[in-house]
Image (tube, rainbow, N blue to C red):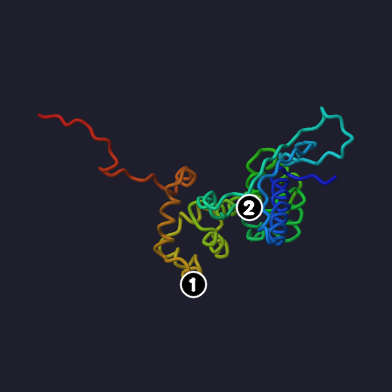
């Protein structure tokens, strides 16, 4: 029986239910459209920790003793329109591994074998000691630390992933590299194609924000935002 991460299990359920909703919507008649109101699933699974530290599940085939199984209970319903308004847009963590320039198709296929498909999957696995050591031991034939830096650049919450991917194409491989760029270097570090979408002023503003982040400050590149008089708490004045 194939194993899945819990994330993959959730995605598989959502895709199946989306198909059910579409089928119901096509089955409209004089009485109106059929809609799925709520679905409750109780899935008995076997759990184990994979070599990269991820929790893997495989559905029970029905012949295992109950005490050896874990039950995953899911209760799902379609979101109302007003519930989706505040959902965050897709981020760099959702991007595929193909945006990382040092990963060959062969390496990506090997990573897929470990249930690593996106930038977010890659960073989640390599952020644990067990996952990082697994990557080192299996010898994936790429610079692991450099690729982690590239993935962190793409996943940066402070910048659009299109900017991060454009920087990678121009040899800027980390948040630190981006923070170090001088104004003149910055002009040549992004493509004309990107400038048609984002202004240079916006890119400079993003760079300033990156320079104020703890990881960049800790590396000695950025600097803490300076407090203005408006930021200082009001205190008592003394009369001399």
Position of residue 139 in the picture relative to residue 184 (left or right): right
Residue closer to the observer: 37 or 178? 37
Label 1 sits on a secondary structure element that is helix
Residue contact between numbered discs 2 and 1, judged by CB atoms under 8 Å: no
Instruction: Provide residue 192's location: percent of width, then percent of height.
Output: 49, 72
Position of residue 227 in the picture relative to residue 113 (left or right): left
Say if 71 sits above or below 191 in the image: above
Say if 191 sits above or below 203 in the image: below
Q: In which quarter of the image is the C terminus?
A: top left
Instruction: Provide residue 148's location: percent of width, then percent of height.
Output: 61, 50
Q: Which residue is drawn at 70% across and 44% down?
A: 39
Q: Residue at x 69, y 50 (%)?
A: 14
Residue closer to the observer: 234 or 47? 47
Q: Mark 1 points at which residue?
A: 192
Q: Residue at x 75, y 49 (%)?
A: 139
Q: Mark 2 points at which residue?
A: 119
As drawn, the residue found furthest toward the top would be 67
Label 2 sits on a secondary structure element that is helix
As drawn, the residue found furthest toward the front would be 30
Say if 95 sits above or below 61 in the image: below
Q: Quadrant of the N terminus?
A: top right
2 or 1: mark nearer the eye: 2
The quarter holding residue 181 reads bottom left
Position of residue 67 in the picture relative to residue 15 (left or right): right
């Amino acid at each position: 029986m194939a194993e899945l991460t819990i994330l993959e299990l959730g995605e598989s359920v959502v895709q199946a239910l989306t198909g059910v909703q579409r089928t119901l919507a096509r089955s409209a008649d004089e009485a109106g459209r059929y809609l799925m109101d709520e679905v409750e699933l109780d899935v008995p699974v076997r759990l184990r920790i994979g070599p990269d530290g991820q929790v893997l599940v495989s559905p029970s085939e029905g012949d295992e003793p109950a005490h050896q199984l874990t039950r995953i209970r899911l209760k799902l319903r379609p979101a109302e329109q007003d519930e989706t308004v505040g959902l965050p847009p897709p981020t760099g963590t959702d991007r595929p591994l193909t945006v990382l320039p040092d990963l060959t198709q062969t390496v990506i296929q090997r990573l897929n074998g470990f249930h690593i498909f996106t930038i977010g999957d890659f960073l989640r696995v390599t952020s644990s000691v067990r996952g990082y050591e697994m990557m080192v031991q299996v010898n994936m034939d790429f610079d692991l630390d450099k690729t982690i830096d590239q993935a962190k650049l793409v996943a940066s919450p402070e910048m659009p992933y299109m900017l991060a991917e454009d920087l990678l194409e121009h040899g800027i491989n980390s948040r630190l590299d981006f923070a170090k760029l001088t104004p003149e270097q910055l002009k040549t570090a992004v493509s004309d194609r990107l400038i048609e979408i984002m202004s240079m002023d916006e890119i400079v503003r993003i760079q300033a924000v990156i320079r104020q982040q703890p990881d960049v400050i800790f590396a000695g590149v950025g600097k803490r935002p300076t407090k203005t008089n408006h930021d200082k708490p009001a205190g008592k004045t003394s009369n001399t």
